[in-house]
Image (tube, rainbow, N blue to C red):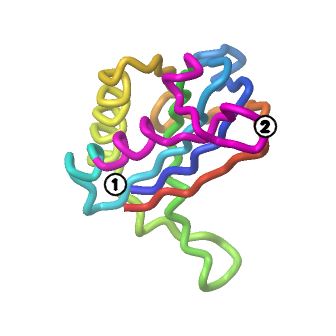
Amino acid sequence: MRVVLQRVKEASVTIEGQVVGQIGQGYLLLVGFGPDDTEETLDYMVHKITNLRVFESEPGKMNLGLKDVDGAILSVSQFTLYADVKHGNRPGFSNAAKPSLAEPLYQRFNEKLAATGIPVATGQFGADMQVALVNDGPVTIWYEK
């Protein structure tokens, strides 16, 4: 599982001209799955993400977590996090989980995030999405398990 986390002032995802997910302050998560990901992988990522402290308690000190600032999560599926660009000029995606595995993992991941009490908005698995954000910092963190 791979997650790119961006601390945002606001973020939204639009499909066919309609906003389907939107948050204010919080995290935009770009989420991809590999073929070996399991419930344990999801639990690990949920714990790491929901306990991350990257909001400032005072200038220059990132001591606050998402719950401390009443933040939210916008979770967007993105299989392209598993792109292989070692050969040629066109990426290969054979390292990404097949949709039949990835979609239930994505749904379960979002359920587990929401179960922590943090508001969670989502994109739509497999859709062509336009993602807008106002990056805060910027703070961008890469997770891989």
Q: Amino acid at mark 2?
A: Pro
61 inside magenta stretch = yes
Upstream in sequence: badge 1 or badge 2 = 2
Image quarter of the C terminus: bottom left
Q: Nearer the viewer, residue 66 or 28?
A: 66
- Can you give x and y, in whole percent of width and height, for residue 13 in the image? 64, 26
Apparent side of residue 105 relative to residue 80 in the rendered image (left or right): left
Q: Amino acid at mark 1?
A: Lys
Are there few (<14), some (14-19), or many (20+) residues within 10 Å of tag 1? some
Image quarter of the N terminus: bottom left
Q: Nearer the viewer, residue 69 or 104?
A: 69
Q: How many marks?
A: 2
The residue that mark 2 highlights is 59
- Can you give x and y, in whole percent of width and height, for residue 12 in the image? 67, 23
Apparent side of residue 89 relative to residue 94 in the rendered image (left or right): right
Q: Residue at x 43, y 20 (%)?
A: 118
| Residue 61: numbered disc | none
| Secondary element at tag 1 | loop
Q: Residue at x 55, y 66 (%)?
A: 83
Q: Which residues are magenta?
A: 44-70
| Residue 57, quarter of the rendered image | top right
The residue that mark 1 highlights is 98
